[in-house]
Image (cartoon, rainbow, N blue to C red):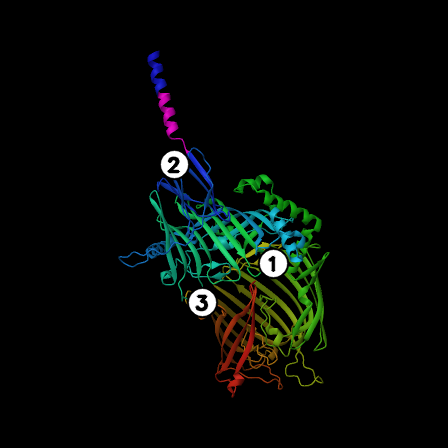
Amino acid sequence: MLSFVRPLLLLCFFLICTATQAQTRTVYGTVRDANSSEKLPFVSISVNDGETGTTTDLDGKYKLQLNRPVTSLRFSYVGYDAKIIYPDSAERYDILLPPSVAQLQEVVILGSGKNPAHRIIRLATQNRTQHRLSNLPAYTFRTYNKFILTATDAQEFDLSDTLQLSEQDSAYLDMRNLLAGQHLFMMESITDYAFLKPDNASETILATRVSGIQQPSFGAVAAEARDFSVYEDMPVFFGKRYLSPLSPGSTRKYDFILQETVVTAQDTTFIISFKPEAGKNFDALKGLLYITSNGWAVQNIIAESADGAQRGVRLQQQFKQTGPQQKWFPTELDLEITVPKITLRGHQPYGRIRTYITNINLNPALKKSDFGVVALQQKANAAKQPDTFWQQYRPDSLNQLELRTYQQLDSVGRAQKLDRNIRVLEYLFRQQIPIGPISLDLNRLLRVGAFEGLRLGIGAHTNEVLSERFKVGGYWAYGFRDEETKYGADASFILHKPSQLQVKAEYFEDVLEPGGKRFPFQQTGFLKDLRRVVLPLLSYASHKSIAVSGRMFRYLQAHAQLRQEEHRPTLGIITDETPINFNLAEAALSLRYAPGETYMNQFNQLMPMQTELPFILLGQYTRGFNSMLEGEHSYHKYEAQATTSWRHRTFGQTSVTLSGGFISGDAPYISLFNGYGSYSSDHYVYTGKGFETMRPYEFFSDKFASLFFQQNFGKLLFRSKFFQPDIVALTNIGFGDLDGAVILPDVPVQVMNKGYYESGLLFNNIIRSPFSGVGVGAFYRYGPYAAASSKDNLVFKFTFSLAF
């Protein structure tokens, strides 16, 4: 018996010793700035002189799990003095790194004189194709997003003597006390994202919480931080394209400095700073790249605009190897936004959105039919998710400052009925003011034009309170220059919501442009229809129509209309004694094809997403009927327009619009094609539509072709400290001919069969604010239809732009 027990005891003792030796050692903590206590992301941590290592996450936190003794930990970060500690039996080590007195300088190998960072940048550039997420066949992931709006001291005030505080100091003190207990605003969301090659993407908001609002119709989405890719030649960075530091030839434009080399086990991480070289003029970024020798992939990146933009944006991305393929995939994102020129009671407001990516699947079962034109939508119960659902995806519990933000603002929101105010704002986005089941149409209140002068009016439609499918409304307006009343009414019914299929009946007594474009898909809004302002003459029209519209396929919209109109033109009419009317009966079919166009369903409405489309095609066929619906003219009218744009790393963005049309039959001149001019001696505003030196009705055609070419150099041609305009060169060309149409004797008609030419140069955003800009443009008319005097061919106009 003893002979059996002794070996068994020895075996148990051996297993216990082995388990003790293999016990996992955990070391964790947070790394901060020793002066400001700010958490430091991407701090390099080397264990036991490089045996292994890691980096801190975006919250400055780190965690190491090791099955060997830890004798030393080295913490290093660009711009800070490195620190080495020798751990004992404790698990948590919070580290304070002091900022360096001087930045590390570029290291140059004396033998060759080459910059050592260039070799690493070239290797990363050569391997970027395999690391582009867009090259993966498909993937899905879940995100947790947290957006916080807060503020920091913009300047220091001496508030020691509270009895002598000025009104400004008191406001500053109130704001400081407020920020000590809560943020200004906060929101969270949990979303599911799916991608299928080549360009199918969708995101669904599963949960949303917004401080102060009980039933939010929107959620925080980190699209800007997620879509930025340093592996693209010209990645989009907060609405603007910049040259990537990993684009081909970047070593000739960027100043790269190898700041540090961290060796961990078999891999090496190279920390390289980048900024534009002195004297180089291009849209550049600056920041830090953490490039690993494991596939020469970007492990971390910190980037911001290098041009001193007024809107300060700073992006951080962290990547980790994921899945059986061990693909480098983003796991944490951080975006900071500040507007330096805006202060709030002595404080600088800034926003930060933090995103954590989990549940990454690189082999999902996705089909093309899983994706539609709506790329961002929100679940109906997203605002009602329980705390248990939130806790699954929050990387950490909310701190006291965040909890108090929700408590305080939710209390204020209920007292101030913020949900109701948000609903009002949603209607305002749609240019409406809700009054119960009726909404006033803001776009009917005021218009200004050369023909009508000041036009005041009122319009209203029923809204979703009455019905989500049926809508009826009307309007009334009066022009103080033409002294005429206009009015109209319409009714519509949505037959199928997913395809946006609806039927609409309309009647109006209003004005129309003779020979103008009548595509139903044209965008309208502030600064989008300035050409109408300069039109000196319009036709009065009585209009009756019924139309069916919807989305036939994912990117194809269709609109079919049957209309009866009576036109009473003012163009070419010398006296009112013998008024001339044109009775038209028309059937029109219009198509719009925009591949890649996507929408988001937020704020209880469908809105287009800001994406660059490869091209947009518009086509329209109109049939005029004689002896039908009181029509007096029979003709066929064909119109088409194609718009495309592309971007070059050196020359900026190129935009081209081609349009043309053809008419056969006895169409009256009001149904022909006017030259699409937008010049007026009384107005000096760049419309961005048509020929800027041509008068609106200078030419008429029954067949035409035109080319509008723009080259937006941005600041690539010129940039100084105080003068940084966006320079745009343009050339417009048009040809037209006319035969067999009904023309009034008193209408002065020219035919541009010899070719109409104009070129111009725009200096946009000479005067700029964070969200708008004012510039100037010069245009010159030349060729067969140029004026005899050179000064009569030169036109100057002001330009206006908005950042949204």
Is disc 1 in contact with disc 3, using a CB cutoff of under 8 Å? no
Q: Examine the image and state in which quarter residue 438 appears.
A: bottom right
* Label whose residue precedes the other's in the sequence (1 or 3): 1
Which SS class for mark 3? strand
The residue indicated by pointer 2 is 70
The residue indicated by pointer 1 is 501
Type of residue at label 3? Gly
Disc 1 packing (10 Å; few <14; some 14–19; many ≥20):
some
- Indicate which label's residue lies in the foreground, 2 or 1: 2
- Indicate which label's residue lies in the foreground, 1 or 3: 3
Type of residue at label 2? Val
Compare residues 403 and 318 and report the one nearer the observer: 403
Magenta span main SS = helix
Is residue 285 something that shows in the picture? yes
Which quarter of the image is occupied by the N terminus?
A: top left
- In the picture, measured across the screen, residue 627 lies left or right of residue 232, that is right
Which SS class for mark 2? loop
Above or below, comparing residue 663 to residue 802 in the picture? below
- In the picture, measured across the screen, residue 242 lies left or right of residue 663, that is left
Name the residue located 66 percent from the left edge and 66 percent from the top edge: 443
* Label whose residue precedes the other's in the sequence (3 or 2): 2
* Label whose residue precedes the other's in the sequence (2 or 1): 2
User: Tag on residue 140?
Assistant: none
- Alpha carbon separation for disc pair 2 and 1: 67 Å
The residue indicated by pointer 3 is 652
Q: x, y percentage for residue 340? A: 55, 60
What is the residue that sits farthest to the top in this orientation?
Answer: 1
- In the picture, measured across the screen, residue 116 lies left or right of residue 274, that is left
Q: x, y percentage for residue 153? A: 57, 54
Which range is magenta? 11-24
Disc 3 packing (10 Å; few <14; some 14–19; many ≥20):
many
Type of residue at label 1? Leu
